[in-house]
Image: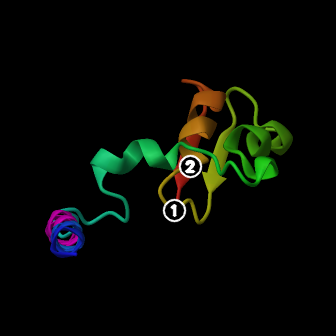
Amino acid sequence: MSQFFIIIMGFIIILGVIAVIWRYSSLRSSIPCPPWLGWLVELDNPFFRNNSARRILKHSGIKTGMKVLDFGCGPGRLTIPAAKQVGPTGEVNGI
């Protein structure tokens, strides 16, 4: 029984250390998502396939060279792919 208790306490301590590290590392950046977690922004939700950035932009009618305003862009899940879609001659602004 004491070995089980030691394992559980070790797990709780590890979770506590991770929480403290997360808290202090998140204080360093002023954006909602720390830069080292930026790759998560690009992932689409696997449960809602109709909410993928690719599908939304496909139905938006955005073409090369257009000017696009992404109002309420959040961390840029649609802004970055839209910028790639309009190309170097287009412009995307996120608010």
User: Which of the labelled discs sits on residue 77, or is there none?
Assistant: 2
Q: Which residues are magenta?
A: 14-25
* The N terminus lies in quadrant: bottom left
Q: Residues within 10 Å of mark 2 (few under 14, many from 20)?
A: some
Residue 93, magenta (yes or no): no
Q: Which residue is mark 1?
A: 74
Depth check, front residue: 65 or 42: 42
Q: Magenta stretch containing residue 24, yes or no? A: yes
Query: In the figure, residue 26 lies in which quadrant?
Result: bottom left
86 in relation to 80, above or below? above
Amino acid of disc 2: Arg
Relative horizontal placement of residue 13, taking residue 36 as reference (left or right): left
Q: Position of residue 73 (x, y in %)?
A: 56, 59
- The residue lying at 69 percent from left, 35 percent from top is 66
Q: In the image, what residue occupies the spot 65% across and 41% down?
A: 67
Picture layout, residue 5 above or below residue 44: below
Circles 1 and 2 in contact, beta carbons < 8 Å = yes
**For residue 40, side relative to residue 82 (left or right):** left
Number of numbered discs on residues: 2
Image side of residue 36 versus residue 13, left or right: right
Q: Residue at x 51, y 51 (%)?
A: 76
Q: Secondary structure at mark 1?
A: loop
Mark-to-mark CA distance, 1 and 2: 7 Å
